[in-house]
Amino acid sequence: MRKDFNVKRVSENIINWIRKYFEKQPNAKGAIIGISGGKDSTITSKLLVEALGKERVFGILMPNGEQKDISDSLRVVDILGINYKIVNIEEAYNGLINGIKDDTLSIDAKINISPRLRMTILYAIGASMNYRVCGTGNKSEAFVGYTTKWGDNAYDFNPIGNLTTDEVIALGDYLGLPYELVHKTPSDGISGQSDEEKLGISYKQINKYIEKGTCYNKEMDDKIRIKYEYNDHKRSLPPKYELKEGSDYNGEKQ
């Protein structure tokens, strides 16, 4: 984390940014957010409550069958005092897998179905409530493409999208959230591995690379660079062909 990172100022600025976003969304009644029990959704939910008040924040817990740490998710909504709903995606997930009827689906292809289902649920309920969907992905994850396209990287606004994992943790500590939630080992809750085990890179190394252009380990530098380049499509809007004057038109003035 950069030495000049001012956590107090960043916290205040994000809270004001959220308020301004909703001032420009006069028809939006509040924010809806997926509560996983991890640090990102916990800290983002706290920011929403500080900005909008707990009455305008709605949490959705979306386990896929049994979620071993769902008690953490329930603890979050209890601490923040927000209303919430539990939607188990297991039936929908199994229905899609069975409906596709393709034994060649890769493990990652199957894993990515879950966050896309969760995105669908957030937008369905959010549309019914007239709430905007809040994203919870951080900069470190996005940098190496550790996100699901049209899954967790689909949202209306994201308060922590430009913060590294170190900065998110600093923010959670500053906001007074329980240590064990803020410093919880991040995992996707699907693969059975921690984020760092699945990536083969530590977030400390990723953050150092973001800040310095190197993590001082050539093998890891190369790995991070390759992941960054390969996953550029996740950080960019889908391209559209642009019609060109003199090429796609016959030259006549309209």
Image: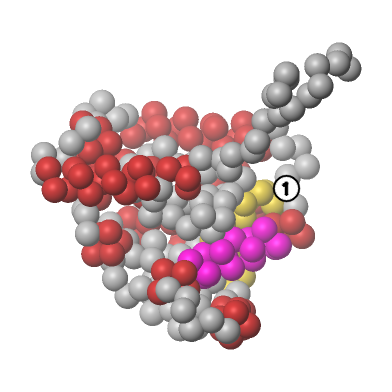
Report the quarter where the N terminus lies: top left
Q: Is residue 134 magenta?
A: no
Q: Where is residue 246 drawn, in percent x and y?
A: 73, 19
**Horizontal arrangement in the rendering, residue 129 relative to residue 66 (left or right):** right
Residue placed most toward the observer, 107 or 121 = 107
Residue placed most toward the observer, 165 or 210 = 210
Q: Is residue 122 magenta?
A: yes
Q: Which residues are magenta?
A: 111-125
Farthest residue to the top: give it. 253
Q: Where is residue 184 drawn, in percent x and y?
A: 29, 61
**Horizontal arrangement in the rendering, residue 70 relative to residue 169 (left or right):** right
Query: Image quarter for residue 208?
Result: top left
Identity of the residue drawn at 73% across and 20% down:
245
Is the residue 69 above or below the residue 254 in the image?
below
How dense is the environment of label 1, judged by Cα within 10 Å: few (below 14), some, or many (20 and up)?
some
Q: Where is residue 73 drawn, in percent x and y?
A: 45, 68
Residue 150 visible here: yes
Q: Where is residue 182 drawn, in percent x and y?
A: 32, 55
Is the residue 126 above or below the residue 161 in the image?
below
Tell me the amino acid under the disc marked 1: Lys
Identity of the residue drawn at 86% across and 16% down:
252
- Residue behind mark 1: 29
